[in-house]
């Protein structure tokens, strides 16, 4: 069966996810704010969930229609062949959202959507009651300007949940966003990459996983694997292919440091859980002490933003220190994300390029400072946008 699929992602990184989908062989991508629509089968659903590094979820688009009354909503949902998507014992969890629509009562929209689904299921399965003891299905009714989109989530826990980070430090960066920062840079596996404010290690770990070609979802499960009509062999085959592509031995060129020794302990633990403990090195160190004799390295980091009360002066001092550190690294490139509006002034240098996107609920700028072009190394990696 061919499905209309939707990959969702943080606003601003759509081009990164589109590049990933193209590299997986998908074409005819429709790119919108925070989502990309494309077509695929069950194997494609497995591949996207297992391989995509920057997407949040993979959804099946069951329907899209206009509705300004609850009756139109009911009939639109009921027109979907739900027996093609849901098993007879499906546990249905309907969530909803409504933006600038006449159907503004989300609880009512959820209730009507589920009622319409059950009515359609009665036609398919010739029964009047469903006990919902089987596989879970997360169905969303989303209404924007009276356009209704009905989707079924194939992922379950978000794709940022790789499985290696069960313990988190303060204000963790999502794994998907960390990957976006890396893929937006000119860094290539084999070159030096350093995060001197690594916290619990997300950026270095994700870079090491890229270097080792470890698929981010290869060691976790997805909700659609339990669906009755989905073939477990397909998921097993995709996982086997992903594991067969992994590189066991790569140069040790990824590093992370942080002032907090507890964060370093977490980072080491997470790296081991992710299977990259032999590839990334962590060290407890003040960022102002960072220096390297290596040439053409890359700093990619997510420093504190100063959002908490009383933090601003310390954060602004930190940004000045970062500027001093970067001046000592005359061949290095630096990539940094922050919501602070005066970062460049504090840092002491204007970025070669800036890019806006949301990190959680915060509108941030991704500041990109380019060093001189390094000698070529063999890699197909390319920066995005």
Image (cartoon, rainbow, N blue to C red):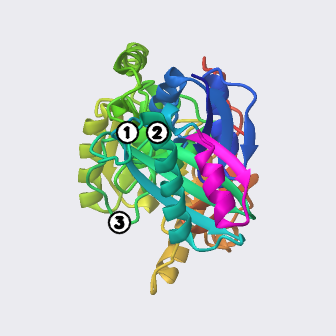
> How far across and down, in percent of the image, does residue 264 sit?
28, 53
x, y percent for residue 245: 43, 15
Quarter occupied by residue 355: bottom right
Residue 323 appears in the picture as rendered: no
Q: Nearer the viewer, residue 369 or 245?
A: 245
> To which quarter of the image does residue 250 belong?
top left
* Sequence-first disc among 3 and 2: 2
| Residue 97 part of the magenta segment | no
Establish if 18 lies above or below 238.
below
Say which of marks 3 and 2 sits in front.
2
In the image, the segment drawn in magenta is 60-80
Q: Which residue is mark 1?
A: 223
Describe residue 360's horizontal placement relative to residue 258 as left or right.
Answer: right
**Quadrant location of the N terminus in the rendered image:** top right
Q: Which residue is located at x 33 percent, y 40 percent?
A: 89
Residue 139 at x, y = what percent? 49, 50
Residue drawn at point x = 35 percent, y = 48 percent: 129
| Residue highlighted by disc 3 | 170
Q: Assign the C terminus to one quadrant of the image.
A: top right
Tell me the CA gap for discs 3 and 2: 30 Å
Disc 2 marks which residue? 154
Element type at mark 1: helix
Q: Earlier in the sequence, mark 2 or mark 1?
A: 2
- Vertical arrangement, residue 156 with respect to residue 303, above or below: above
């Amino acid at each position: 069966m061919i499905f209309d699929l939707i990959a969702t992602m943080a606003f601003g990184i759509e081009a990164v996810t589109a590049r990933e989908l193209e590299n997986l062989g998908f074409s005819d991508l429709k790119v919108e704010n925070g989502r990309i629509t494309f077509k695929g089968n069950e194997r494609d659903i497995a591949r996207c969930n297992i391989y995509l590094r920057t997407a949040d979820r993979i959804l099946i688009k069951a329907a899209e229609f206009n509705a300004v009354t609850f009756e139109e909503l009911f009939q639109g949902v009921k027109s979907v062949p739900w027996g093609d998507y849901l098993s007879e014992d499906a546990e249905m969890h309907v969530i909803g959202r409504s933006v600038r629509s006449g159907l503004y009562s989300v609880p009512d929209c959820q209730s009507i959507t589920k009622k319409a689904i059950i009515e359609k299921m009665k036609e398919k399965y010739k029964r009047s009651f469903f006990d919902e003891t089987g596989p879970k299905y997360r169905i969303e009714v989303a209404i924007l300007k009276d356009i209704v989109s009905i989707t079924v989530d194939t992922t379950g826990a978000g794709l940022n949940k790789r499985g290696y980070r069960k313990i988190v430090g303060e204000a963790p960066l999502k794994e998907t966003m960390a990957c976006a920062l890396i893929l937006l840079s000119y860094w290539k596996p084999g070159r030096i990459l350093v995060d001197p404010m690594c916290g619990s290690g997300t950026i270095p770990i994700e870079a090491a996983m890229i270097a080792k070609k470890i698929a981010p979802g290869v060691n976790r499960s997805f909700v659609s694997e339990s669906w009755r009509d989905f073939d477990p062999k397909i998921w097993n085959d995709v996982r086997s292919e992903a594991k067969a592509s992994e590189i066991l031995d790569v140069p040790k060129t990824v590093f992370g440091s942080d002032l907090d020794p507890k964060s370093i302990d977490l980072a080491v633990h997470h790296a081991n859980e992710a299977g990259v403990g032999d590839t990334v090195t962590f060290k407890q160190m003040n960022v102002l002490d960072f220096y390297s004799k290596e040439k053409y390295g890359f700093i990619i980091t997510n420093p504190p933003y100063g959002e908490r009360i009383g933090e601003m002066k310390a954060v602004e001092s930190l940004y000045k220190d970062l500027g001093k550190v970067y001046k000592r690294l005359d061949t290095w490139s630096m990539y940094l994300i922050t919501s602070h509006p005066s970062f460049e002034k504090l840092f002491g240098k204007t970025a070669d390029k800036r890019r806006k996107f949301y990190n959680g609920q915060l509108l941030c700028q991704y500041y990109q400072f380019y060093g001189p072009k390094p000698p070529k190394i063999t890699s197909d990696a390319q920066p995005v946008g």
